[in-house]
């Protein structure tokens, strides 16, 4: 067994080998490093005003998406889909924690309170697709204008994760 750590979210993973992506934030295998190589001060970043505003937008977006997925996960009529979107809610909550850490702000008090879903699996899955597409595009934009290498790295990594969530929405429709 080895101790690994995700460079993006900082969570620790104990395993024989690296996971193909971070089980917590979904970052690609390239960001999984041995725990002794993890730079403890990686999130000590001096923020520009633009970066701070973009982090605040990221926190809002992740909170809204977490709460939307928790609402989907609370539905009783399709346990397979409910569990898939519960997983997504956990990943988005991890992203929210990460952005809060970088902005040095507390997590929103309502982060884990289910929000409102739209009322049907297909409508919700389409809404999820819209949310993930928007998040992925927005983070690519934030990465492009960030001056700090750390923030650029985080937004690039999370943008890719949100893009993989778009694939889940495609698969999910076959379970409706
Ligand atoms: Fe991670
Ligand atoms: Fe996210």
Image (cartoon, grey):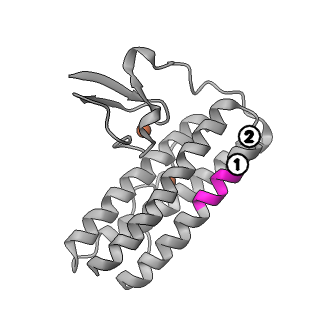
The residue identified by callout 1 is 142
Q: Is residue 122 above or below residue 34?
A: below
Quadrant of the image for the C terminus?
bottom left
Q: Main secondary structure of the magenta part?
A: helix
- The answer to whether 81 appears left or right of 166 in the picture is left
Q: Which residue is denoted by mark 2 in the rendering?
A: 146
Quarter of the image containing the N terminus?
Answer: top left
Q: Circle 1 — which element?
A: helix
CA–CA distance in space, label 2 to label 1:
6 Å
- Compared across the picture, whether 84 is left or right of 133 comes to left
Report the span colored magenta. 135-142
Q: Are there few (<14), some (14-19), or many (20+) residues within 10 Å of tag 2?
A: some
Q: Residue at x 47, y 65 (%)?
A: 166
Q: Position of residue 145 (x, y in %)?
A: 77, 44
Residues at discs 2 and 1 in contact (Cβ within 8 Å): yes
Query: Taking 142 as reference, is 33 above or below it?
Result: above
User: How far across and how far down the image is residue 105, in percent?
Assistant: 58, 39
Between 168 and 116, the one lying in front of the other is 168
Q: Looking at the image, is 84 positioned above or below residue 159?
A: below
Nearest the viewer among 76 and 29 is 29
Question: Which image quadrant is residue 165 in?
Answer: bottom left
Tag 2 secondary structure: loop
Whether residue 120 appears in magenta in the rendering, the answer is: no
Q: Position of residue 37 (x, y in %)?
A: 45, 16
Mark 1 Cα shell of 10 Å, populated few (<14), some (14-19), many (≥20): many
């Amino acid at each position: 067994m080895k101790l690994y750590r995700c460079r993006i979210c900082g969570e620790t993973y104990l395993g024989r080998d690296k996971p193909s992506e971070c089980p917590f934030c979904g970052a690609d295998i390239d960001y999984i490093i041995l725990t002794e190589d993890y730079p403890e001060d990686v999130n000590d970043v001096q923020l520009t005003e633009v970066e701070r505003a973009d982090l605040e937008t990221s926190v809002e977006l992740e909170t809204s998406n977490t709460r939307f997925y928790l609402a989907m996960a609370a539905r009783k009529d399709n346990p397979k889909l409910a569990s898939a979107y519960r997983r997504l809610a956990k990943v988005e909550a991890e992203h929210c924690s990460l952005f809060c850490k970088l902005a040095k702000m507390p997590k929103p008090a309502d982060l884990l309170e289910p929000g409102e879903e739209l009322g049907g699996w297909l409508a919700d899955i389409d809404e999820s697709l819209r949310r993930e597409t928007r998040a992925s595009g927005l983070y690519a934009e934030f990465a492009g204008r960030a001056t700090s290498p750390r923030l650029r790295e985080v937004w690039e990594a999370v943008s890719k994760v949100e893009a993989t969530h778009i694939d889940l929405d495609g698969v999910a429709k076959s379970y409706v």
